[in-house]
Amino acid sequence: MQISVDVHNYMETLVGQVLTTEEYVSSYSQEQLADLACLALGQLKPIYIRYDIDFLAALPEEKLVLYKRNSEIAVKNAEAMILDDRRKNRSQDIPVIFSHHNFDDDVELDWYEKPLLKNT
């Protein structure tokens, strides 16, 4: 088994769909698109799956719509960081700290997030 081949984060698929739109492809270089992807994915809760078709078959449509919307928001947030790229002006090197996540740790887990083994 190769994890990078057999398992993937579904949010990568959704962020990739946003970044392949003409709006982003025509505005940013490949380097900037890669930066956008990293920054956007860092804001999103990962959903690791093996097969898209099995996952999507059991996923309620409203959840998919929510995941797509969250991906679009995360890319927009990342875009603001790219436009104001602090690497251009290294003398003002201040770390970026995210204080708000796009997911709530107190929300009940979905069916695909629940552990298979019970605590003993």
Image (spheres, rainbow, N blue to C red):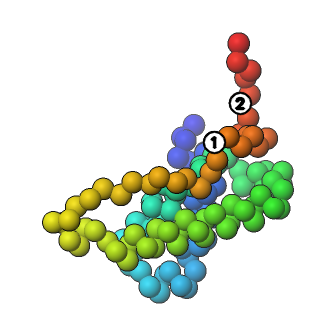
Q: Which residue is mark 1?
A: 105
Asked if residue 112 shows in the view, the reply is no
Q: Residue 47: give x, y in percent of width and height.
A: 64, 48
Identify the residue at the far top of this view.
120
Give the SS element for disc 2. loop
Nearer to the camera, 108 or 120: 108
Task: Please state the horizontal and vertical placement of residue 67, each as a whole percent of the image.
Answer: 69, 61
Task: Determine which quarter of the picture holds residue 73.
Answer: bottom right
Identify the residue at horizontal 79%, vertical 41% (top origin).
111
Quadrant in which the N terminus is drawn: top right
Q: How many numbered circles are shown?
A: 2
Residue 82 in the image, given as x and y percentages of width and height: 38, 72
Whether residue 37 is visible, yes or no, is yes
CA neighbours of label 2 inside 10 A, class few (<14), some (14 to 19), many (20+): few
Mark 1 element type: loop
Of 62 and 3, nearer the camera is 62
Q: Is residue 6 above or below residue 87?
A: above
Picture coordinates of residue 81, whole percent (x, y)? 40, 69
**Residue farthest front in this picture:** 99
- Residue occupied by mark 2: 115
Query: Residues under labels 1 and 2: Cα distance?
Result: 15 Å
